[in-house]
């Protein structure tokens, strides 16, 4: 069987299912191949930031947030050394906490309802390349050994973090920054209902947020090169190092989860977007670009890209015209940084800050001041604001605030050394992240100079 279509999508994950629905509604013919249509049980993608909710609304997909006990998330509570404070998302906006599998099945149901969209369960094994152009895919349907093909004007590859096609279509190197160990806490009374909880812990942070009315997701960062494995040592680590840093009321549910020992572990990747532009194909979602999940930004980036790419393709009209199609792809790759740079930079910069004692403390104290010191950074984290200038101004203001705090206890050679180290580390944490996002000269040259001076 050979299908001819406008767009072929590889993978009906968050990006693929949303794009198929959006394009189908714009009267494009779409064929989707998805490896596994069953509901998945994963620890990824369970907190959608308000900026992601807004993207769903803009695409007319807001209904996928209903019908499975998703929880509103109204801001963050931060904990450090027994102290705590909260920051609400601005403008009364809220995000959502949910089981990723439930959310994705709702997105897929919307996709399956679209008459212009055909979905096949199967695994894409190859991209068809002819005269330097990708003209479709070869896939093996589920429960079959005979490969089939789909011919399309455009192939969109969104096969997720372990993409089989990234190497061919991107110059990016995949780096594992840490691992998240995920647990479910049952009937856990969070200190702040409907808030994400970040514990700025030793040696690395952990997160708690509601994913339905009875379950809380807990993600614990493991900053070492090897993933944590189920063992008596791991249980001992969780009991002796993590439990003492948890808010007291969470402890009974945490201990129960330790007894059940249903842990899941995922690697956290850093993949800057460096696509190799090729005719007839585009990379999207985690196969294109990944950042640390500490700030829960991945789905918001994916949905932002879906909206942006979908609009460009709908405007292009005739996708059979390679020149017009290639212009749309070039425009997508060239401009996506404007929408996503803040989310990408903040995620890995904040993770870098959490790994540096002086900056970590400075960041916590800075946010605790409240007012614009909390509201503007949270508007960036939630993707309500996508203003890179605002993000970088606050990032360097945190370092300067930390320096001021150090000087308060007297000027000494140690204070000067710590101050210099804070500034140097801030520049070296954020510098490479900014360069990945096509910065304006206003930031590019001062940061490059800073990197050279503060070696
Ligand atoms: C530990 C962790 C926690 C995270 N938490 C959050 C969070 O709280 N909030 C947030 O916004 N983001 C979070 N993220 C990131 C988020 O999950 C991803 O950015 C998002 O899921 C990306 O969507 P995607 O469609 O690119 O990939 P996916 O949703 O993974 O979809 C890829 C799809 O492709 C299919 N597929 C793969 N290969 C093939 C093939 N050869 N043929 C056919 N189909 C194929 C897969 O079956 C899958 O359905 C987290 C990530 C991690 C690692």
Image (spheres, rainbow, N blue to C red):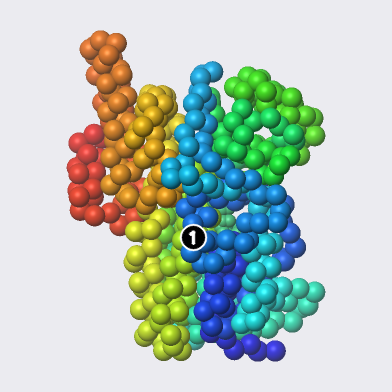
Which residue: 38% across, 58% down?
339
Residue 437 seen: yes
Camera-side residue: 213 or 230? 213
Q: Tell me if residue 349 comes above or below residue 63 in the rendering.
A: above
Q: Quadrant of residue 374?
A: top left
Which residue: 50% across, 50% down?
50
Q: Tell me if residue 377 comes above or below residue 129 in the rendering.
A: above
All told, the count of numbered labels is: 1
Which SS class for mark 1?
helix
Ligand 1 within 8 A of label 1's CB? no
- Could you say where residue 253 lies in the image, as x and y percent from the top left? 73, 29
Q: Residues within 10 Å of mark 1 (few under 14, many from 20)?
A: many
Q: Tell me if residue 90 comes above or below residue 329 in the rendering.
A: above
Residue 167 seen: no
- Could you say where residue 347 lies in the image, as x and y percent from the top left? 45, 44
Residue that label 1 marks? 55
Looking at the rendering, in which quadrant would you find the N terminus?
bottom right
Q: Tell me if residue 265 comes above or below residue 189 in the rendering.
A: below
Q: Quadrant of ligand 1?
A: bottom right
């Amino acid at each position: 069987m050979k299908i001819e279509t406008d767009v072929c999508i590889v993978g009906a994950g968050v990006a693929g299912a949303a794009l198929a629905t959006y394009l189908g509604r714009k009267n494009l013919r779409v064929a989707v191949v998805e490896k596994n249509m069953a509901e998945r049980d994963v620890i990824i993608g369970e907190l959608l930031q308000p900026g992601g909710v807004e993207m769903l609304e803009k695409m007319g997909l807001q209904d996928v947030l209903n019908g499975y006990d998703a929880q509103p998330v109204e801001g963050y509570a931060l904990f450090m050394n027994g102290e705590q404070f909260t920051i609400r998302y601005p403008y009364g906006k809220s995000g959502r906490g949910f089981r990723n599998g439930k959310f994705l099945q709702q997105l897929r149901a919307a996709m399956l309802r679209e008459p212009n969209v055909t979905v096949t369960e199967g695994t894409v094994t190859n991209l068809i390349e002819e005269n330097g152009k990708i003209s479709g895919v070869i896939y093996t349907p589920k429960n079959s050994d005979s490969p089939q093909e789909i011919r399309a004007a455009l192939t969109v590859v969104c096969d997720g973090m372990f993409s089989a096609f990234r190497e061919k279509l991107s110059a990016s190197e995949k780096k594992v920054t840490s691992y998240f160990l995920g647990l479910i806490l049952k009937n856990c009374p969070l200190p702040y209902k409907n808030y994400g909880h970040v514990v700025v812990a030793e040696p690395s942070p952990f997160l708690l947020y509601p994913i339905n009315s009875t379950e809380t997701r807990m993600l614990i960062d493991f900053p070492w090169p090897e993933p944590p494995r189920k063992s008596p040592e791991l249980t001992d680590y969780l009991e002796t190092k993590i439990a003492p840093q948890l808010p007291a009321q969470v402890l009974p549910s945490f201990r129960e989860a330790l007894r059940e020992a249903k842990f899941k572990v995922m690697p956290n990747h850093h993949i800057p977007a460096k696509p190799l532009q090729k005719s007839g194909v585009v990379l999207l979602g985690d196969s294109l670009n990944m950042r640390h999940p500490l700030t829960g930004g991945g789905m918001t980036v994916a949905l932002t890209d879906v909206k942006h790419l979908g609009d460009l393709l709908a405007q292009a009209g005739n996708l059979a015209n390679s020149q017009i199609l290639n212009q749309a792809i070039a425009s997508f790759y060239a401009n996506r940084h404007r929408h996503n740079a803040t989310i990408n930079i903040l995620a890995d910069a904040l993770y870098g800050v959490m790994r540096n004692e002086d900056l970590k403390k400075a960041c916590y104290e800075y946010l605790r001041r409240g007012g614009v010191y909390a509201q503007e950074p949270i508007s960036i984290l939630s993707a309500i604001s996508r203003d890179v200038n605002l993000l970088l101004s606050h990032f360097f203001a945190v370092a300067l605030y930390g320096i001021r705090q150090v000087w308060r206890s007297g000027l000494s050679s140690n204070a000067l050394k710590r101050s210099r180290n804070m500034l140097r580390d801030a520049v070296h944490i954020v510098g490479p992240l900014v360069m990945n996002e096509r910065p304006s000269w206003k930031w590019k040259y001062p940061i490059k100079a800073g990197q050279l001076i503060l070696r």
